[in-house]
Image (tube, grey):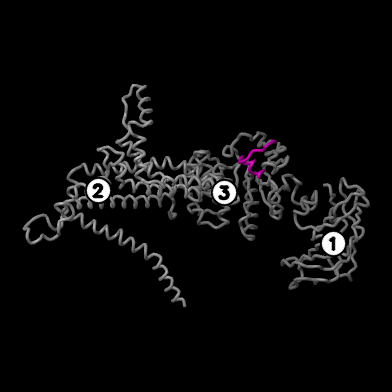
Amino acid sequence: MALLEIRNVTRRFGSYTAVDNVSIDVEAGEFFTLLGPSGCGKTTLLRMIAGFDLPDSGQILLDGKDMVGIPPEKRPVHTVFQTYALFPHMTVADNIAFPLKMAGKAPQEIKKRVNELLERVHLPNFGNRFPHELSGGQKQRVAFARGLVNRPRLLLLDEPLGALDAKLREEMQIELINLQKEIGITFIFVTHAQDEALALSHRIAVMNRGNVEQIDEPSKIYSAPRNHFVADFIGKISVMNAAVMEAAPSHLKLAIEGLGEVTAPAREGVEVGDRGVLAIRPEQVRISHPSNESQLKNHFRGKVHDFLYVGDVTTYIVELVNGAYIEALLPNSAPGRAKFFEVDDEVTISWRHDAGIFLNDHQ
Amino acid sequence: MIKDGTKEKQLARLLVSGPPLLFLIVFFVAPSLIMILTSFRFPGEFGGLAPVTPPSDKAIGEYGFTSDAYQFFFSDFIYTEIFLKSFAVAFGTTLICLILAYPLAVLIARSRKHLRNLMVLLVILPFASNFLIRIYAWMIILGPESALSHFLNTVLGAFGIAPVTLLFSPFAVLVGMVYVHLPFMVLPLYTNLEKHDLSLLDAAQDLGANAWQRFWRVTWPLSLPGVFSGSALVFIPVLGMFAVPDILGGTGDILIGNLIKDQFLGTRDWPFGSALSIMLTMAVLSIAGLTTWFARSATGQRAI
């Protein structure tokens, strides 16, 4: 039995359906992420798990027990809020002690647990400070400590890293992974940042317009997106309209308008005549001078339309002969060189026969 | 350039703070000094003050400076009693105002924005009519022929209790005081509560706090600055109020305000009236000082 079972949960606000017949199981000890653009229903779902909102239909079960009618303060579920929501009139130690006091724990135990948590979030001497005396990252750590101190069955994190700058975010991500590993409490993390979701989670549920599009491990979500939305939302991807010409158990043969024939990995449920897109990640696309004859089957001529230099890598946007654009990623491995091609350079684009993925239109 | 800049700044500061400063010197500091001097002089025969130096045609009389007024105050316990009673009334009024105003302020602060402004308007609307008229209205409401009195005495009669008079009693004074000063409590409380971050209440609930704990651990401590300023705005004016006890109170319900007013308009003992005023001011200042100190330590070093 899963720790948390969300069964056919629907929540409507007037004519707007925020969460539409969603079912998710979260196992004990998991770092589970709800990922999706704003307005996809992930925060509504989180509020229903915490008890601040109730489903119009469906059930939420924690340890097999239906949570309906149980108010937030009685649920063994704590939340780390996006704005931290630290109590400004209490010291850091009092903030962390709050859930323990509410649970009626003994003063000695409270003191012990608070010190333990301060230690764990690397703020051992901050107990007597007030929240307004802390930096953003420190506030964040206090919020984590406060959420974890009373050992909830489930810790909900509502975009907790959203307010931090990029560098600090990366640091906190690593700390968060370690914290979850050490403490072993189940995390449900809500975010719209796909890189964060990929880096942190054991499993991800990609949500869109109140529906769950795919639930999978990060690597599966990235390499085998179930549909166009997931492919597009997670990472960068180039898409080209394609029709299936041959569907063998080992591979697909696709026809791309104005370009020619392409080999793609086989996929279940794809039949000859299906229309859809070929989606391919920039790091799987090779870019080379036209003089180097490519050994790969899938290769085409193109012209550099634009490029984006971000330091470690440069992304080239190449216009193919049929007018479609494809992105290719090239590491800047040669010291001192920022780019290998200029705009309007003639190039060859190629990718392996097992790269890319065909996505049906109707999926 | 920099020097000119600071000079300009200084001038601007002077222009902005000058007028109110001047106003306070002319209408607060100077009168206070006059009052202090007056309290150490002898009363004139027909009111006013006796001259400091005796006129040449009179040999010996009551001239010069004296601490008679202060000695007189402590010679009869009744004056101390009136002081204590006034403080008790002020304290009671403040407490009742706080208890009545707090839920109202919470209600206003948690209402939708356009409703909030309407409700604040309703709170201050009584100020649109004259203060004395509003107090006289209470005379009618609490009077022996009023519907309220009739109803109350009918109910009491049914239980075999002798009829009561509401008007001209400490009860009437308290009702009047609370009625007049309630808005002064509601407004600072509302201003404070409106700024509260409601996500703190969600956080408290999420972490296991029930409704009472959410109020007592989060809303109440965060509202203390509003509680203190509201209390000061009620407590201090109630101490000096004479119109309400004059109109709604009985002969035994005299407060300091009435006593001071009588010294100037009735008994015409200016030095004693001044001495009473100064002692009242001192008492208020020390209470305000203590409250500020207490408020600072209670709200955790944050400025209020």
Q: Are marks 3 and 2 in contact (CB under 8 Å)?
A: no
Residue A153: in magenta span = no
What is the C-alpha distance between the residues marked 3 and 2?
60 Å
Single out the mark in the foreground, 1 or 2: 2
The residue labelled by disc 3 is: A145
Q: Helix, strand or loop at disc 2?
A: helix
Label 3 and label 2 in one chain: no
Ranked by sequence position, the earlier of labels 1 and 3 is 3
What residue is shown at x 60% (from left), y 38% (from top)? A75
What stretch of residues is rendered in magenta? A44-58
Q: Which amino acid is tagged 1?
A: Ala
> What is the crowding at mark 3: few (fewer than 14 residues within 10 Å), some, or many (at least 20)?
many
Single out the mark in the foreground, 1 or 3: 1
| Residue A140: assigned label | none
Q: Which amino acid is tagged 3?
A: Ala
Label 1 and label 2 in one chain: no
| Residue A324: assigned label | 1
